[in-house]
Image (cartoon, helix red, strand yellow):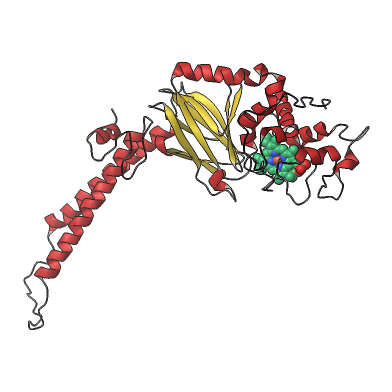
Amino acid sequence: MSMFGMLATMKLGEATSGGGFWMPENASTVAAEVDGLFYFINNVNYVSFALCVAILLFFAIRYYAKPSSHATFDPDAPTHNTPLELTWSVVPLLIVGVMFWLGMTGFLELMEAPSDSYEVRVTAQKWSWTFQHPEYGVTEAAELTVPLNKPVRLIMTSSDVLHSLFVPAFRVKNDVVPGRYSSLWFQATRPGQYRLYCTEYCGKDHSKMLAVVNVLPEDEFQERLGKLAREYEDIEDQDLPAYALSRLYNRCASCHSLDGKSGTGPSFKGLWDRTKKGSTVFTNGTSLKDLMGKGGEFEVPENYIRDSIVNPQRHIVQNYTGAMPTFQGQLKQRQIDALILMLKNLDQLVDDQGNVIEEPNLDNADISTGAQQ
Ligand code: HEC
Ligand SMILES: [Cu+2]
């Protein structure tokens, strides 16, 4: 056991799995050590604070100059005391040395992922997280499924600005930087769902940049990822719109509402009608109508939607900016089709307020995705 672990088990604090006054629940192998060091430093602070105040009060009272007494100086009074000075220098030095040692070894432990770690690629973008599992060919959004009791290494990058990934229950955090890779590792010790935050202010909807870490026992984990890997293939065409709404829309939700309110991007409500009519106007003054029809850029309106998802910068809708990231390579063809069908059948999937209808009636759903580009 490392010194860190020893400290934690010495019960210097209340590092229980349910968390304590200072700390949230803990669910990773390093959490007890991090908490142990935190409580150690905290307790040293309490003791030294109490000691300083007590000595201060003692001297203030003991040597209080009464108004009647004249200040007299005793030329033989002690001016220094070597043992005393050594004590108050060496003891704190040792304590601070212990803090440094524990902090440094713990830091090094956090930096170096075990070589048999399960790898996940993380992409941060305003204002969502995507998690790719190369071993399974699965991309998750807003949810990260990981195996229990197995080291997991996140290899992270950002497609826009600086973000930071933080899972309080695991006591791990690292910056996610555009144009380079950073990494993080943890080993979850308890199954369950834990909050994942962005902890670097990254713009307007930073506070919505949340995800859940779903820790599953190894066999359930494999089953779940296997299922996710086949999910969009196995699904009936008829069910694609509902699939897109429940499984893919969370990647669009931070910018596109379902209730008609415009956000960073236009609301999805009414988008299909507008697209079909070609009434959408772009920042350069042209309208979608000019680009549609035989020989045009988009022969069918479905292709405009498809292009908006993979080439969002090509045509920018009036009153909006080019804030949309491309989903090229992140969504499979069939998933993009599913999104198109979701937009086409949105009226059947959500009510006027944008609330998801529990059991939508899609018997007459329009499930044609138009010609492929
Ligand atoms: C970071 C914010 C953001 C995210 C996330 C985002 N979009 Fe967008 N989207 C925009 C903005 C801004 C526009 C308008 C500018 C433009 O045309 O590119 C837009 C435009 C669109 C349009 C064209 C709208 C129109 O009125 O013609 C479609 C379709 C679209 N997005 C689909 C999606 C889908 C599907 C997703 C999720 C898979 C998604 N977007 C995710 C910001 C976003
Ligand atoms: Cu962020």
Q: Is residue 214 above or below residue 178?
A: above
Q: Residue at x 20, y 56 (%)?
A: 50
Q: Is residue 106 left or right of residue 157?
A: left
Question: Picture coordinates of residue 327 (x, y %)?
Answer: 69, 33
Q: Which residue is at the front of the view, 40 or 264?
A: 264
Q: Is residue 70 left or right of residue 42?
A: left
Q: Residue at x 86, y 45 (%)?
A: 287
Q: Residue at x 15, y 61 (%)?
A: 55
Question: Which of the 4 quarters of the picture holds residue 149?
Answer: top left
- Can see residue 336? yes
Q: Is residue 46 above or below residue 217?
A: below
In the displayed orientation, state which residue is furthest to the right: 295
Q: Which residue is at the front of the view, 112 or 209?
A: 209
- Can see residue 97? no
Q: Is residue 105 left or right of residue 160?
A: left
Q: How many marks?
A: 0
Q: Which residue is at the front of the view, 372 or 55?
A: 372
Q: Is residue 171 left or right of residue 55?
A: right
Q: Quadrant of ligand 1?
A: top right
On the rendered image, what quadrant is the N terminus found in? top left
On the rendered image, what quadrant is the C terminus found in? top right
Question: Picture coordinates of residue 190 (x, y %)?
Answer: 38, 27
Question: Picture coordinates of residue 280 (x, y %)?
Answer: 82, 45
Q: Is residue 337 above or below residue 126?
A: above
